[in-house]
């Protein structure tokens, strides 16, 4: 009984796309989708963008808080590097928000790519530190 929410969520995740994008065979021998989603307002695109930004921000904050609660140490520094890298990748992804579209495209692309590169380098450093701890070096 306590797992009913998980089962209902899994069923919704599986059933909604199956019903939405189900296909029917008509009398002319062609396949057509039963429900045609036409989104001229880009509403679904914006919902997807904001959902991604919210999840990215929350996970970055969780890793940041977890690293701070360790008060230093090897694993605290690993989590700090990971959280810094995740935050920079999040900020790089956040440059895709429509608010920034007024900025010159090449400048925005340079900022986006720079944040991604630095973020991934920091996460690579964190993975390297974690590997050294696991190997006992």
Image (tube, helix red, strand yellow):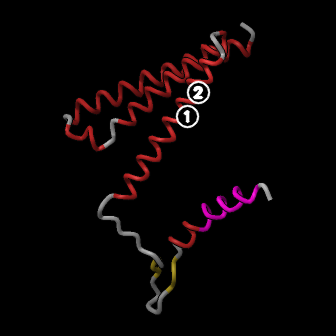
Q: Relative to residue 32, is residue 11 drawn left or right?
A: right
Question: Residue 112 shows which numbered tag?
Answer: none
The residue beneath circle 2 is 63
x, y percent for residue 71: 64, 12
Q: Residue at x 37, y 52 (%)?
A: 46
Q: Is residue 55 found inside the magenta-colored segment of the image? A: no
Is residue 13 on the magenta stretch?
Answer: yes
Q: Tags 1 and 2 in contact by the CB under 8 Å rule?
A: yes
At x 68%, y 62%, the residue is 8
Rendered residue at 51%/82% (across/down): 24
Q: Is residue 42 above or below residue 89?
A: below
Judge whether 89 appears above or below 78 on screen.
below
Position above or below: 55 against 63: below
Give the magenta-colored segment's residue range: 3-15
**Residue located farthest toward the top when viewing the structure as drawn:** 137
What label does residue 59 carry, if any? Answer: 1
Q: Position of residue 62 (x, y in %)?
A: 58, 30
Q: Is residue 8 left or right of residue 81?
A: right
């Amino acid at each position: 009984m306590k797992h009913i929410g998980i089962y209902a969520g899994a069923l919704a995740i599986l059933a909604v796309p199956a019903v939405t994008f189900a296909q029917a065979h008509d009398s002319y021998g062609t396949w057509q989708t039963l429900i045609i989603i036409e989104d001229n307002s880009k509403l679904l695109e914006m919902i997807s963008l904001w959902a991604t930004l919210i999840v990215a921000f929350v996970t970055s904050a969780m890793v940041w808080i977890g690293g701070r609660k360790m008060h230093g140490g090897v694993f605290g520094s690993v989590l700090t590097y990971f959280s810094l890298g995740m935050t920079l990748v999040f900020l790089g992804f956040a440059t895709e928000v429509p608010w920034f579209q007024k900025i010159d495209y090449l400048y925005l692309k340079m900022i986006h790519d720079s944040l991604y590169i630095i973020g991934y380098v920091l996460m690579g450093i964190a993975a390297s530190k974690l590997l050294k701890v696991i190997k006992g070096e």
